[in-house]
Amino acid sequence: MGAPGNRAVRGGATSGQGEHEAGRPGEQDAGRPGEQVGAEPDVRFTLANERTFLAWNRTALALVVAGLGIVQLLPPFPGVPWGRHVLGVPLIVLGAAVSVTAFAEWRRNQTALRRSEPIPQTLLPRILVATITGVAALSAVVLLVSAVR
Amino acid sequence: MLPDRPGDRAARAAAGLPEDPEDLSPGTAAERTRLAWARTAIAFGAVGLAMLRREPVAGVLVLAATPLIWALGRYVSASAPPETRSRRLLLVTVAVTGVAVLAAVAAFIGHGGPPRLP
């Protein structure tokens, strides 16, 4: 969402309808849901935000399938009967977390676009990198323990 | 997407082209979004088929969500009210989270079986 966000700041992302409302979000938007505040942004930004959300959800599905595949398709690690679950279940949980966070971020970005504010920083790549690195480290530990036993 | 280099905008302006290449054909944004929905529906179908062999019930449930996602993508509309758009995306989140719950259940009580303690 970097490009649309930057453009939103540089050139103004709103469609022109009710732009005066966007300047006073506090007064006009009190009590309104996040995706209804401010003015309707340029539809291309809205669609780009939606595509980003969908891309994160496909990533979430891939994580869930990878986790299930590890648990059900890998042969058990000799001497480490819990090894497959330790590696697979965090990926399944991460999949659910990525999907929920993607929705929260879509709402946040949409609100920022409607208010012509900068797009907030996304947490998702950090969550993804931290968990995948953790699972990779765990894989090494499980393999080592399995080799030692 | 390639980064916007400083010279690009000036070159495009000199050639009489719009600053954003998408301005030449704004409809492509809606088309790309429809394709993204189609890819997401196909991903659901692939996950359902992958689960079908070992967890038939979970696989059928995920496969049943595929046409729903496909149908949601057919109604990509620039004029959709914000609350409709929000509800549609919330449905996708609920569906993906549901798949994760099914996968977690399958991991513990399905063919993977519970982790056996030594």
Image (cartoon, rainbow, N blue to C red):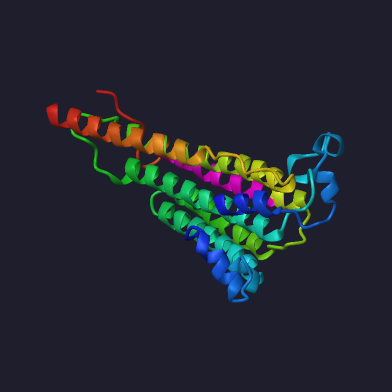
Quadrant (top left/top right/bottom left/bottom right) for the C terminus of chain A = top left
User: In percent of the image, x 30 and y 30: which residue is there?
Assistant: A82
Q: Which residues, given as a range, are shown in magenta? A: B88-108
Magenta segment includes B101: yes
Give the camera-side residue of A144 and A22. Answer: A22
Where is residue B46 shown, x and y percent of the image?
A: 45, 58
Is residue A60 depicted above or below A26 in this figure? below
At 24% across and 38% down in the image, what residue appears? A76
Spot occupied by residue A112 in the image (x, y as percentages of width and height): 69, 43
What residue is drawn where x is 48% and y is 57%?
A: B3
Q: Is residue A52 magenta?
A: no
Q: Is residue B50 visible?
A: yes
The secondary structure making up most of the magenta span is helix
> From this viewpoint, which residue is outermost toward the left?
A148
Counting from the top left corner in percent of width and height, residue B14 is at 59, 73
Task: Classify A74 as above or below A77.
Answer: below
> Is any part of residue B104 visible from this angle?
no
Instruction: Please identify the quarter of the rendering in which residue B29 is found.
Output: bottom right
Between B38 and B106, the one lying in front of the other is B38
